Image (cartoon, rainbow, N blue to C red):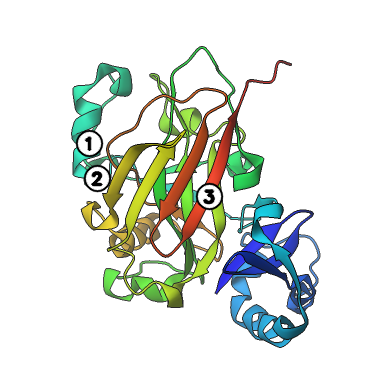
Amino acid sequence: MKICRFNDNRLGIVEGDEVLDVTAALDVLPALRYPYPVHDQLVAHLPELRTRIAALKASATRLPLARVNLLSPVANPGKIIAAPVNYVKHLQEVLDDPNLHHDNQISHIQRAGLFLKANSSLNGAAEGVTLVLPDRRTDHEIELVAVIGKTARNVKAADALDYVAGYSIGLDITIRGPEERSLRKSPDSYTVLGPWLTTADEIANPGQLAMELLINGQTRQKTSTSELILGVQALIEFGSRFYTLHPGDLIFTGTPEGVSPIEAGDQFSARIEGLGEMQVLIKPHLAN
């Protein structure tokens, strides 16, 4: 199932070139009072939600996919976890180019570890990316994103996929410079998730997915997730040793080689096998 959020926080499922409006299925989510949970309610109750969606599907209003505004399919992740330099060729690319590493210590992921991005940086495909420091080099990074489906702590790699609710395409937008990754990658809109959440039952092997990023119709990044240094299972094992993972937490698995600068007016086309394709516009800096 492909589950999306669109327009004014409507809930839909994507079938072909249509979106079926199943917003009424949100009624299965429990009412909450403060203090609110640290996880995403929709993802935490995905099984019940899917049952309700199935009951609503026949009578759902159908809308052209091309005419809806797609939001991030996960509204309230507790954490956005990201994997640095997790493709061998990208690691070498960064080491070889001073414009990428800026004298920062660059290590393989087993030594560098993971990092966190601010939740406030999360956007959907239709919301685009707004440049915040136009005088600084800013790069694109396409990534496979795993969405955690249930609470996980000290999970073994062999069991890790049991904790995945689904997958999405991610864009990890990066300002180049000497600062820590979590700062340079966390401005508003610099984490794009979409175009929808593809449930895990539709992806037999997240380690064998072709991926490609085009800018203005020209391919910039193209590889397969088979080239990951640490795959989804290993990343969940690694991350769950340090953090308790909660439903809706996002794991950005890293980007392949081919990163390059972006500028206002650029149009991204990001695609991953089985997960669809999303169009994302780069918008100019907004002066205060």
Depth check, front residue: 230 or 193: 193
Q: Residue at x 47, y 33 (%)?
A: 216
User: On the rendered image, what quadrant is the C terminus found in?
Assistant: top right
The Cα–Cα distance between marks 1 and 3, rounded to whole angstroms, is 26 Å
Residue 278: mark: 3
The Cα–Cα distance between marks 1 and 2, rounded to whole angstroms, is 6 Å
Q: Are marks 3 and 2 in contact (CB under 8 Å)?
A: no
Instruction: Check disc 3 and give the amino acid type.
Output: Met
Mark with earlier residue (3, 2):
2
Instruction: Check disc 2 and give the amino acid type.
Output: Tyr
Q: Residue at x 76, y 57 (%)?
A: 9
Q: Residue at x 48, y 68 (%)?
A: 166
In the image, taking residue 7 as reference, residue 129 lies left or right, namely: left
Residue 24: mark: none
Residue marked by disc 2: 87
User: On the rendered image, what quadrant is the N terminus found in?
Assistant: bottom right
Q: Quadrant of residue 175?
A: top left
Residue marked by disc 1: 91
Which structural element holds mark 3? strand
Q: Are marks 1 and 3 in contact (CB under 8 Å)?
A: no
Label 1, residues with CA under 10 Å away: few <14, some 14-19, many ≥20: some
Q: Are marks 1 and 2 in contact (CB under 8 Å)?
A: yes
